[in-house]
Each structure stands twice: as C-alpha cells, then as structure tokens.
Image: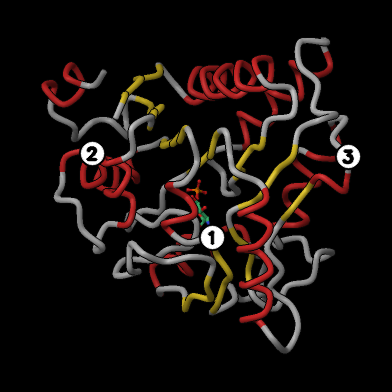
Amino acid sequence: MKIIIADNYIHLSEIAAGIITKTIIEKPDAVLGLATGTSPIGTYKKLIDFYENGLVSFKNVHTVNLDEYVGLNEKHAQSYHYFMHDIFFDHIDIKQKNIHIPCGLGDDLEKNCREYNEILLKHPRDIQLLGIGSNGHIGFNEPSTPFKSFTHIVELTERTRHDNSRLFGFGDSVPKQAITMGIVSICHAKKILILASGAGKADAVYNMVQGDVTEECPASILQLHNDAVLVVDKEAASKLDESAISQSD
Ligand code: GLP
C-alpha cells in the first residue's frame, strides 16, 4: 500500500481530488466508485472546483456508490442518495443515467443486491474511493464480514450507528441495516484510494496497514491490493511506525 501523509484535511482533499482527476483525464469515460461520510467531502468540493475551472469534465464518467441505508428514501436528508446529489452530483456535468447507488427500499432487498451486482459487473471501476470506519469497516462491511462477499444486506454495529448518529437530527435514529458493496466487489477496482483524517481513525489506520489481514478488520484486505493508495493526515497516521510509512511504495 502506498501511503501519502497530508499536512491537514485540505491538503488531503487536494491530493485525492488530483488523483481522481488524473484518472478521468487519462480515461474520460472512467468508472468511479464513490463513498459517503465526512472524509471525502473536501475531495468532492475540490473536484467541483476543478470542474468549474474547466480542468475536468464528468460528462462521460460513470459512478457506482458503495452503500445506502435500508429504509431511507432518496429525499431523506441522511440517505446517501441525497448526500451524493447535494454534495457532488448537482454541481458537476454528470449525466443522471450514469449514476448508480444501491437501493435500500422495497420488499425484496435480496433482489436489489443481485441487481446491484449486475451493475457492478457492467461497470468495472477504474478507481474506488473509500473512507474507513473507526472499527475498520469499508463501505458498510462490518468486522467479521467474509472477505468473499458481494453486495449484501448488513446489520450495522452499535459502534457504527453511534459514529454515524452525529449526522442524524434529534429524533431521527440511524437505521439498523444497510445495503453495501461487498469486499470482493471493492477489491475488483483497478485502483483504490482510501482517505482517513483525524485522531479517531488512528487505530483503524494502524490495523488496516500494519495489523494482520483478517476479517475482523475489513480494511486490512487492502494490504493485498496491488494499487491501493492511502491518503492520511498526521493525526490519523499517528500510530503508524516510521518504517511502515517509509517502506510504502
Ligand atoms: C460510513 C460509510 C463508510 C465511511 C464511514 C466513515 O459508515 N458507510 O463508507 O467510510 O462512514 O465515515 P467518515 O468519513 O464520516 O468518518
């Protein structure tokens, strides 16, 4: 895994947006795997900035998102559909038909999973953007998720529900389930770009980079990917050994 230490969150976002922009310039119809959460917000802002300044266009880009809560419709302010449009898609020239986000609604969620797997097969990703949960989850693949998983429904852990509750208003509880791209699908991306910021991520970053490759830390599988790039600020990198940073290629 290549590790890039950023000075701060703004710097981290500039680096990540630069990597994604390079992917699109080299391949204007690139498929981007996208993530939600607070970690990529600065990256999306920077990409909008690049778009507004004519440095990049998304008109032939396709996107596939990692995950969505079960039971929230796309107008719900905490749904990942809403987040992606509000933070990113509404500000760039992407075609609506090129946007794919898993659907957590309806009576047959297994069917939604199968349909999303089909979409992923048709859209092999050039780059997959990822955040990391404080317990090492990627997408919504919680600890103990089999590494061999495809799109599936998950029961969210109390820790994840607690972490994510800061984004929900009073009286609005975090859903107990989500639909997520599986670990196999995540690892199929040609390049993986992981973002981590803040001291609260330091343990998860350590376990991802220097811990054992184990289903107990889903992100640890990324040690085996041949083009994974971690962009991390100093706080989130604070538990990494110097040797792990200097040996990263
Ligand atoms: C959620 C998302 C993940 C994200 C994680 C970390 O659980 N499903 O994809 O990586 O939150 O979020 P944040 O970047 O806000 O710390």
Residue 39 at x, y percent in the picture: 52, 39
Sequence order check: which comes first, mark 2 or mark 3? Answer: 3
Residue 65 at x, y percent in the picture: 64, 51
What is the crowding at mark 2: few (fewer than 14 residues within 10 Å), some, or many (at least 20)? many
> Which picture quadrant has residue 227?
top left
The three-letter amino acid code for the residue at tag 1 is Met
Residue 57 at x, y percent in the picture: 81, 21
The residues tagged by marks 2 and 3 sit, at their Cα atoms, a distance apart of 36 Å
What is the crowding at mark 3: few (fewer than 14 residues within 10 Å), some, or many (at least 20)? some
The three-letter amino acid code for the residue at tag 3 is Lys
> Which picture quadrant has residue 49?
top right
Residue drawn at the location 58% of the way across and 16% of the way down: 18
- Mark 1 or 2, closer to the camera: 1
Q: Nearer the viewer, residue 10 or 60?
A: 60
What is the crowding at mark 1: few (fewer than 14 residues within 10 Å), some, or many (at least 20)? many
> Which residue, given by chain and number where applicable, does mark 1 sit on?
181
In the displayed structure, would residue 59 be above or below residue 131?
Answer: above
In the displayed structure, would residue 142 be above or below residue 171?
Answer: above
Q: Which mark is residue 72?
A: none
Q: Is residue 50 left or right of residue 109?
A: right
Q: Is residue 168 left or right of residue 156?
A: right
Residue drawn at the location 68% of the way across and 57% of the way down: 119
Q: Secondary structure at mark 1?
A: loop
> Which residue, given by chain and number where applicable, does mark 3 sit on?
95
Q: Secondary structure at mark 2?
A: helix
The three-letter amino acid code for the residue at tag 2 is Val
The residues tagged by marks 3 and 1 sit, at their Cα atoms, a distance apart of 22 Å
> Which residue, given by chain and number where applicable, does mark 2 sit on?
209
Residue drawn at the location 56% of the way across and 44% of the way down: 38
Cβ at disc 3 under 8 Å from ligand 1: no
